[in-house]
Image (cartoon, helix red, strand yellow):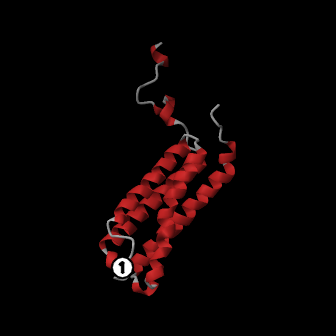
């Protein structure tokens, strides 16, 4: 009997140690990159707010930047949790909301010329737009095409 007992640290036999498939690994990488890039970009955006706005008055106030980062990041993390639980529709909605945090980066160029930003800012604006916006939203489109139709509805 003692020989068949599972050791408490043997994670292979616990429910939380389910194998992670390729799409989940991909989502982890996308979200990790999105969060890392957006931390840098949103922090810089808050600290150098006047550069990002060109010193012009805008409806987006400085305090809104860190608050929106928290909301976009929370949506991304909730999307990941729903994805792991095979709640595809909820995952897609949360991840789509999170991708807005990257997609809005094109707004930087509506009132300020790209030449007004330094290379550091441009790199993070571009990276946040591509990874946190386009790549994450592309993953959402994949979920809606591949997973949502198969989602089981509760009876």
Nearest the eye: 132 or 54? 54
Q: Residue 83, position in %: x, y?
A: 55, 45
Measuring 51% from the left and 48% from the top, which residue is drawn there? 80
Which SS class for mark 1? loop
Is 14 located above or below residue 91 in the figure? above
Answer with left or right where residue 38 lies relative to residue 153: left
Horizontal and vertical percent position of residue 14 = 48, 30
Q: Position of residue 55 (x, y in %)?
A: 34, 82
User: Measuring 54% from the left and 43% from the top, which residue is drawn there?
Assistant: 84
Crowdedness of circle 1 by 10 Å Cα count: few (<14), some, many (20+)? few
Q: Residue at x 68, y 53 (%)?
A: 145
Q: Quadrant of residue 36?
A: bottom left
Relative height, residue 110 to residue 150 (above, below): below
Comparing 67 with 114, the one in front is 67
Q: Which residue is mark 1?
A: 57
Residue 78 makes an appearance in the image:
yes
């Amino acid at each position: 009997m003692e020989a068949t007992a599972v050791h408490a640290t043997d994670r292979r036999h616990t429910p939380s140690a389910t194998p992670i498939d390729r799409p989940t690994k991909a989502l982890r990488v996308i979200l990790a990159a999105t969060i890392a890039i957006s931390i840098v970009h949103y922090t810089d955006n808050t600290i150098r707010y006047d550069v990002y706005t060109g010193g012009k008055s805008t409806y987006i106030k400085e305090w809104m930047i860190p608050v929106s980062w928290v909301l976009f990041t929370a949506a991304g993390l909730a999307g990941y949790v729903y994805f792991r639980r095979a709640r595809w529709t909820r995952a897609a909605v949360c991840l789509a909301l999170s991708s807005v945090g990257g997609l809005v980066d094109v707004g930087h160029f509506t009132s300020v010329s790209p030449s007004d930003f330094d290379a550091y800012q441009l790199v993070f604006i571009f990276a946040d737009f591509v990874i946190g916006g386009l790549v994450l939203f592309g993953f959402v489109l994949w979920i809606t095409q591949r997973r949502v139709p198969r989602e089981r509805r509760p009876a």
